[in-house]
Amino acid sequence: MKKKYIANKEVIRGLREKANLNQNYFKDNGEAEGISYRQYQRAESGEEVSKNLLDSIARFYDQFLKNKKGSKVNITFENLVKKNENINNKVDTKNKEKEKTIVNFKAESSYLYRVEKHNQLEKVIKLSGFRRKIFYKFDPSPIDAGLIKNFLTDITNLKTQKKIIKDTDYFYELENEINSLNKVTDIATSLIELRKRDINIYAGNFNLPIITMEPDDPAKIYFDENFSDDAGDWHSCVADTNYAIFCFDKNNYSPSITFTYHNNFHREKLEELNKKLNFRIHAPWGIGISECEENLRNLFPNYSDRLDKEKTNLVETDVYDLLSDDEIQEIGEQYMQNEMEDAYYSGIDPKDD
């Protein structure tokens, strides 16, 4: 028997209100979203439901709010579960006491979505800082590696040169318009070439908490011409740095992949470390952050503000996991038919080598 979880009805209702939707949206569009209207109602009522249902609801709101509302917040299955309410996984008092001492890491997740168009990549890159992590779920052949290198070059150019890609109004700005068009064309071409080799790209964002600095009073920060840098009074704090996550997978047509990170330095732990650090300085930003990082290394030698690949896990979504037993025949076949039609009209035969 599969585990059941008590849905957090307040969170789910809040997400729906933030999306400016009513429940009838799932009556009209539930089949396309892979969420049945009846099952959605059960979740928003706070009933006991499956992980698959909560996962699909989380994926829906994660994509909807990012695409339609410009949200930068990752929504995952964990957000929709009533805390400590796994009804098929009750633990005795002895185990509960043991759980309280296990605070070394926290499993944190986000969703990576299969990339269909270049604008999906633009959104992921725009949300990120200048950090990215790349994963391969297969061993690339020399041909595959060459195509992947071209793609990585294209998205790096999109990030590092994004400031020159802008809307143009005048005829003399033709060069900028052509540069912008070339970048879109390069990425679109790379996606087509990768698909011909049955390589799919999954992309998404992940917020990694780190210890950094912020001003005591932003209004009192000034530009120091001697250092060509912002200067003032700073103190250490915990903030998120956003990673762009890219995953290459072959012969996998899942709509999404769940990216999970076993974070040894989760936010709660960093808040405690920062209280001990309590770093303060009056200096230009560059000098201040260098001294802050040096103090961090001296106090906590094992601390890292980088995402460790060894602590990650990537699990693809089986489309049938999103459906109840009663819906597999009705919706599942339609989904697969749509996939074949998309492949046909894009000129890519899924059976081609």
Image (cartoon, rainbow, N blue to C red):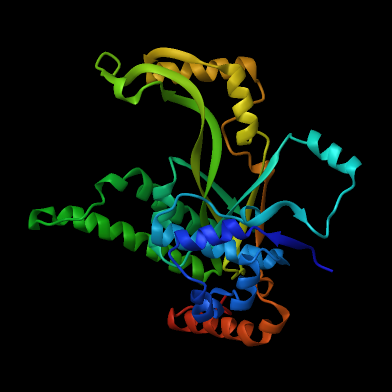
Find residue 228 and report its horizontal and vertical position in percent.
28, 20
Q: Residue at x 30, y 24 (%)?
A: 219
Q: Residue at x 45, y 49 (%)?
A: 72
Is 343 situated above or below 112? Answer: below
Name the residue at the left extreme.
171
- Residue 170's quadrant in the figure? bottom left
Tell me if residue 317 can be seen: no
Q: Residue at x 21, y 58 (%)?
A: 178
Instruction: Return the residue nearer the eye: 293 or 32.
Output: 32
Q: Residue at x 43, y 78 (%)?
A: 346
Find residue 348 and report its horizontal and vertical position in percent.
48, 78
Quarter of the picture containing the N terminus is: bottom right
Quarter of the picture containing the C terminus is: bottom right
Is 76 situated above or below 344? Answer: above
Instruction: Return the residue nearer the eye: 41 or 169.
Output: 41
Instruction: Return the residue nearer the eye: 20 or 206.
Output: 20
Tell me if residue 35 can be seen: yes
Find residue 176 and report its horizontal and vertical position in percent.
19, 53
